[in-house]
Image: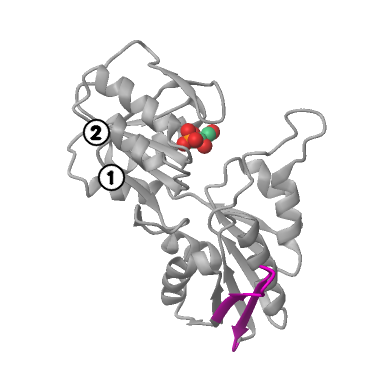
Amino acid sequence: MKVACTERSRALGARIAGQLGAGLADTTFSRFPDGEIYLRAGPLDDTTVVVGSLLSGDSLVELLLLIDACSGSEIRLVVPYLGYARQDRAFRPGEPVSARAMARALSSGVSRVVTVNVHKETVLSHFTVPASQVNLAPGVGDYIATLGLGEPLILAPDRGAEPFAAAVAARGGWEYDHLEKTRVSGSEVRIEPRNGGAWKGDVVLVDDIISTGGTIATATRMLLGQGARGVHAVCIHGLFAGTALSLLRSAGIGQVAASDTIEGPESRYSAAGPIVQALSR
Ligand code: R5P
C-alpha cells in the first residue's frame, strides 16, 4: 500500500502513511506556462490511499489528476476537508447542488471515500461509491484538555452545532450549550445568548468550520462583554479566509486551533488517527 497526497495535504498524508505503516509515493507538482497543473506520482503499489483536501479549483484539479495517475491500483480516496459541501442544496432556482457536483466528480476511479466532519451528512449520499466520514469531536475534546482551562463551558455558536459541542464536552465531562445565530450576510452574523445567561469562566467555542471568522469573532465579543474570563475557539476545518485571524484577535480571542484537514499555523491536532481507523474498517 502507498499513500499519495496533494500539495496542500502533505503533512496529514505523511501522518496517515506513518500510522498505516505504508510508504509515501513521490509526488511532484509543477505548472505548464499557461497555468495548467502537471503532476507525477510513483512508484505505486496494488492499493493507493490518495489524500487531498478540496480547498479550491486547483486542489480539485490536483485530486482528479492524482486519481488518474494512480489508476493502475485500487484507490481509496481521503478528502479531509470536503469543500463546496455548504451548498448542499439549491437555495434559489438556478443554483447547483455544489456538494453533489463535487461528490460525483470525486467518485470516478476510486473504490471508496473517507472524509472528516462533512458539513451535512446527507452530502455523503451524493458519492456513487461507498463514502463515510469520521468525527473529530473526541480529538477536539482531547486537545481542549491540554489547554489547562479547568472546567470550561463548551459552546456551539448555533443550534446545529450543539451535538458536536455535546460530543466534545463528553470527553472532559464539561458543560455545553449553544448560542442563537442568525446569518445576516456571507461575512456577518448576529449572535444572541440562549437563556440570557452569562458565563463568567472560560468558554471554548467549537464549530466545524472557521471561514471568515465572523461567527466566532461576534460570539467572542458578546461573551467577553458579558464577563467571560477567556474565550477560545477550536474548529475542525480552519479555512481562515482573508483577515479572519486578525478579526479573531481583535475580538479578544485567546487560543485558536484547528485540525490538519487544512494545513496551516493553527493546525494543532491531527485527523490522522481517526482516518486510519476508518480506512482499516
Ligand atoms: C456554518 O454553518 C458553519 O458551521 C460555520 O459556523 C461557518 O461556516 C463559519 O463561517 P464564518 O467563519 O465565515 O463565520
Q: Which colour scheme is used?
A: one colour
Respond yes or no on whether mark 2 lies under 8 Å from ligand 1. Answer: no
Query: Looking at the image, is 228 positioned above or below residue 38?
Result: above
* Residue drawn 67% across the image and 39% down it: 87
Q: Where is residue 185 in the image (x, y as percent from the top left)?
A: 56, 25
Q: Mark 1 points at which residue?
A: 144
Query: Looking at the image, is 141 positioned above or below residue 16?
Result: above
- On the rendered structure, is 176 left or right of 132? left
User: 112 or 91, which lies in front?
Assistant: 91
Residue furthest to the bottom: 43
> Residue 119 occupies which quadrant of the picture?
top right
Q: Where is residue 220 in the image (x, y as percent from the top left)?
A: 32, 28
Respond yes or no on whether mark 1 lies under 8 Å from ligand 1. Answer: no
Screen quadrant of the N terminus: bottom right
Q: Where is residue 280 in the image (x, y as percent from the top left)?
A: 53, 68
Query: Looking at the image, is 193 positioned above or below residue 18?
Result: above
User: 172 or 18, which lies in front?
Assistant: 18
